[in-house]
Image (spheres, rainbow, N blue to C red):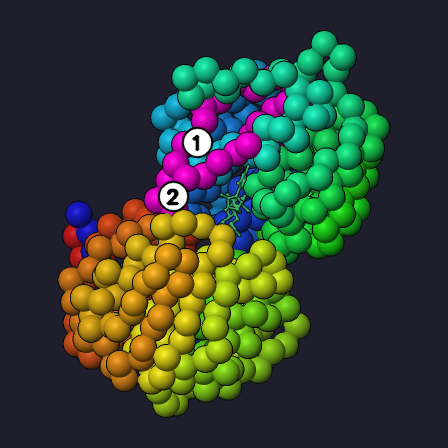
Amino acid sequence: MSYYEIQGGRPLCGALAIHGCKNSVLPILAACLLAPGQSVIHNCPDLSDVSATLDILRLLGCRADREGNTVVIDASALGRSDIPERLMREMRSSVIFLGALLARLGTAELFYPGGCELGPRPIDLHLSALRTLGAEILEEQGALCCRRGREGLSGREICLSIPSVGATENIMLAACGCPGVTTIVGAAQEPEIVDLQNFLRAMGAEIDGAGTPAIAVRGGAPLHPAEHRVMGDRIAAATYLCGVAAAGGEAELTGVAPDTLTAVLACLEEAGCTVHTGRDRVTLANAGPLRGIRPVRTAPYPGFPTDAQAVLMAALAGGEGATLFVENIFDSRYRHVDELRRMGADIQIAGRAAMVSGVGMLHGAGLRSPDLRGGAALVVAALGAEGASQVSELRHIRRGYQDLDKNLRALGADIRELP
Ligand code: UD1
């Protein structure tokens, strides 16, 4: 099984283009189902989660072709509405196909995504919202059978008790196929929701409010295929920024909007880094040890993203001073902590809180990626550590990072993938 061999302590310098955003391309690819014909998606990152999504589209009868970072989806021959359990297990966010299939075909059969490495991953908000829109959903032994109810689908008001990203996206997709107006109250405000709205508008959808807690969709009219460029991946950007913060150096990231990174940049500045931003670029420089900062509490956007918690913790663990982290979004999101401790980190966990006492310098170790962002965090820690680290279980990292090792090498890191 392949692993990264990382010799820490080399400063990272240079420029890097950030790839397209995993979390916005997945619902955008599902949205391609909404209209027959060819949609063209640019800046589509080459990730295993994206490949899994393309496999699902092909299985459903679509053509899906990639050329470089452009993917062409032809949904003219969409013939099936069932997704086998194997593909659902491969990528739990495939539940996003529920709303898209319901809107286009009026039926969807897939499997309950179940728990995952971040703990239980309920979809109750998705299901109750689709029921409100008029779907009948049968749940049997993990299978979900969903179809347009006898009275058909129609726009309604849906209040979300939690601003769930996936539920907001699923409702937006389903609502495109519901005559009348659907309003989502308490919607997630993440930039990825805005990206999905932009694509749906390009397809001819009447939709407003993404980026605020209230989204309105006037659905039922036929949509047409469209061309779209996916936004830059703010979590990949946060990962590289934390890498530069941990290892020292100065790097400019392009292709990412700094206003999607406000909470992360504020923490890195407080920790002692110098940050400059332009329209679609961020430069970060750091010369000394990172300082402890005020408590980092993960929260829905625009709060500190749960997906950047592990990479920031990895950087601060090798700095000086203490920082309290509070993980408010997912249970089981501290699985990187045991691995960081193997590098000498001093981290105490009590429920949702993790107290990180910077030890000045971590040391290299043999490490296993526990999940996608936890794996990236180990790479960040290893870049700043003294000595060599080996990071295994790269399949997790490949779900969300394209060419992580190659990009870091281009910045001057000593990282190689070994078989
Ligand atoms: C998305 C992101 C993920 C990110 C997360 C939070 C994708 C593909 N993934 O995941 O990277 O970490 O947002 O920013 O975009 N919840 C329920 N019931 C539901 C749905 C969610 O209780 O029906 C809870 C979850 O358990 C969690 C919270 O709501 O505690 C937020 O989850 P949600 O925003 O739905 O995350 P995802 O869309 O799964």
Observer-nearest of 255 and 332: 332
Give whichever of discs 2 and 1 has the lower sequence position: 1
Observer-nearest of 83 and 406: 83
Q: Do we see residue 224 in this rendering? A: no
Q: Position of residue 294 (x, y in %)?
A: 48, 78
Q: Position of residue 16 (x, y in %)?
A: 46, 70
Q: Residues within 10 Å of mark 1 (few under 14, many from 20)?
A: many
> What amino acid type is highlighted by mark number 1?
Pro
Q: Position of residue 338 (x, y in %)?
A: 24, 60
Q: Position of residue 70 (x, y in %)?
A: 54, 46
Residue 104 magenta-drawn?
Answer: yes
Q: How many marks?
A: 2
Above or below residue 208? Residue 60 is above
Residue 82 magenta-drawn?
Answer: no
> What amino acid type is highlighted by mark number 2?
Gly
**Within the image, what quadrant is residue 312 found in?**
bottom left
**Does the beta carbon of the residue at mark 1 sit less than 8 Å from ligand 1?**
no
Q: Nearest to the eye among marks 2 and 1: give it.
A: 2
Q: Which mark is residue 119?
A: 2
Residue at the image point whose x is 35% and y is 70% from the top: 355
Q: Which mark is residue 133?
A: none
Residue at the image point whose x is 64% and y is 43% from the top: 161
Q: Do we see residue 57 in this rendering? A: yes
Bounds of the magenta segment? 97-124
Residue at the image point whose x is 72% and y is 51% from the top: 213
Labels 2 and 1 touching (C-beta < 8 A): no
Indicate the secondary structure of the residue bearing disc 2. loop
Residue at the image point whose x is 45% and y is 19% from the top: 143
Residue holding disc 1: 113
